[in-house]
């Protein structure tokens, strides 16, 4: 069984509003064990709506539509559903009575235009909307496929849609399944290599017919491995994922830094806390980003970030006349200087970017002044300009993470 989610409105196709309804509905469907195969967004044009509904009915067993159920001329869902299923619109008197009473309860007379909200494609059922004037529509549509399509049209107003989903739609969909089924996800976070390199390290895990399924996404140089499994309950899903998670951790080693919402700074903060260490940061190329992240990660616990100096030249006197702000000597001076100035256990120093173009040979220098020694590193900084600073900051925090692992 597969589902399709359709969102309607010019405000969505023009980018004036973000379609959060489709995201929410997809999460709910997935929780019920029904994979969502398609997301469709349509503007307020009748022919486009009819074509989209026909395509969805042909390829999905469950279709959930939001939007287009208002009383105005650009609300076309009722009319388009009737055309797509070759049925006529008929008025439902109980729905009309509810709409009229809703207006009266608020001290208004119902505008004549709202009458159309009680019109439904022949053979469909109204979905009650207790607090809104737009009833939903449930349609059971025969197909040439073995199974019919069950289509639900709901208002685009999120509060109304949420209530109608929980009260009417979710229970109806649950009855379609012969036994309870859920789908769950688990995210493994990685850093340190490129997407294609990491994929090559995990042979056979990304086959589309594999169970559990493994997907890969990249954002600002962080790689997320998304593991998806279905089962009768949540426990069986996570149990089915465990061998895959173990394989990933075994093959990737320290490239895996966390799970779910973990960021590198969260992992480093926990490691600092466990080892009873404090850190101070003096950063040039990253312009305070590392310190900002570490400060956020430490906010709800003891403060391990004892100092952060962005204006490195004035903070470390020995750098005032440095001819090469991108050199390893500068990184060492920053790390040792900020450690001494703040009495932190660890000082992290990040030098400036090299001058000129950031080609494949470009690097940024970093130093870690640890309790027993100062470590110096050269990190490649060739990347897309839009993520250069973010990627460099993550490289620095990751170097700290690996140093803490070796120390422990």
Image (cartoon, grey):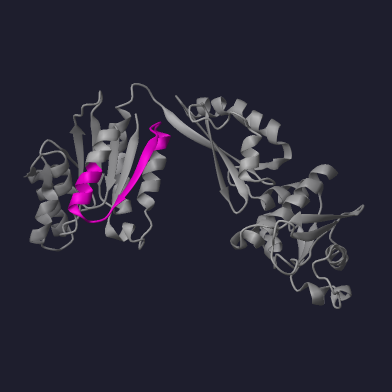
Residue 402's spot in the image, x, y percent? 78, 46
Q: Is 97 situated left or right of 366 in this image?
A: left
Q: From this viewpoint, is residue 355 visible?
A: yes
What segment carries the magenta color?
Answer: 29-53
Residue 248's quadrant in the figure?
top right
The quarter in which the C terminus is drawn is top right
Q: Examine the image and state in which quarter residue 294 appears.
A: bottom right
Where is residue 329 drawn, in percent x and y? 87, 65
Residue 370 x, y percent position in the rendering: 87, 54
Report the label total.
0
341 relative to 391 in the view: left or right: right
Q: Is residue 408 visible?
A: no
Q: Nearer the viewer, residue 249 or 278?
A: 249
Residue at 19% across, 32% down: 141
Q: Is residue 69 above or below residue 306?
A: above
Give the residue drawn at x 79%, y 67%: 326
**340, above or below 302, in the image:** below
Instruction: Say whether residue 55 is magenta.
Output: no
Residue shown at 38%/32% (left/top)? 34
Question: Position of 334 compared to 18: left or right?
Answer: right
Is residue 42 shown in magenta?
Answer: yes
């Amino acid at each position: 069984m597969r589902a399709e989610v359709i969102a309607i409105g010019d405000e969505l196709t023009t980018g004036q509003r973000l379609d959060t309804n489709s995201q929410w509905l997809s999460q709910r469907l997935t929780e019920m064990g029904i994979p969502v195969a398609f997301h469709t967004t349509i503007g307020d044009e009748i022919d486009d709506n009819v074509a989209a509904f026909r395509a969805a009915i042909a390829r999905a067993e469950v279709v959930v539509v939001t939007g287009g159920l208002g009383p105005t001329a650009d609300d076309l869902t009722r009319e388009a559903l009737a055309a797509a299923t070759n049925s006529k619109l008929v008025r439902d008197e109980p729905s009309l009575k509810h709409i009229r009473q809703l207006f009266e309860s608020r001290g208004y007379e119902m505008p004549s235009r709202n009458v159309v909200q009680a019109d439904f494609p022949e053979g469909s059922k109204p979905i009650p909307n207790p607090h809104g004037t737009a009833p939903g529509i449930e349609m059971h549509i025969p197909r040439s496929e073995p199974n019919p399509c069950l289509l639900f049209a709901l208002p685009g107003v999120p509060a109304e849609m949420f209530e109608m989903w929980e009260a009417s739609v979710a229970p109806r969909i649950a009855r379609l399944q012969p036994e309870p089924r859920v789908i769950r996800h688990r995210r493994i976070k990685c850093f340190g290599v490129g997407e294609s390199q990491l994929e090559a390290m995990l042979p056979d895990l990304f086959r589309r017919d594999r169970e559990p399924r493994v997907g890969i996404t990249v954002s600002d140089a962080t790689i997320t491995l998304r593991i998806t499994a279905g089962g009768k309950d949540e426990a069986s899903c996570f149990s089915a994922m465990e061998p895959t998670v173990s394989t990933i951790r075994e093959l990737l080693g320290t490239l895996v830094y966390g799970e779910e919402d973990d960021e590198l700074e969260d992992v480093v903060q926990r490691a600092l806390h466990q080892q009873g260490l404090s850190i101070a940061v003096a950063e040039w190329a990253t312009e305070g980003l590392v310190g900002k992240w570490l400060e956020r990660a430490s906010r709800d616990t003891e403060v391990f970030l004892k100092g952060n100096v962005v204006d490195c030249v004035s903070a470390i006197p020995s750098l005032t006349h440095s001819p090469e702000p991108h050199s390893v000597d500068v990184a060492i001076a920053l790390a040792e200087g900020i450690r001494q100035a703040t009495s932190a256990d660890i000082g992290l120093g990040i030098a400036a970017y090299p001058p000129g173009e950031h080609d494949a040979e470009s690097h940024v220098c970093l130093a870690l002044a640890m309790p027993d020694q100062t470590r110096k590193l050269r990190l490649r900084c060739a990347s897309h300009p839009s993520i250069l600073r973010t990627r460099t900051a993550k490289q620095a925090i990751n170097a700290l993470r690996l140093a803490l692992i070796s120390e422990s």
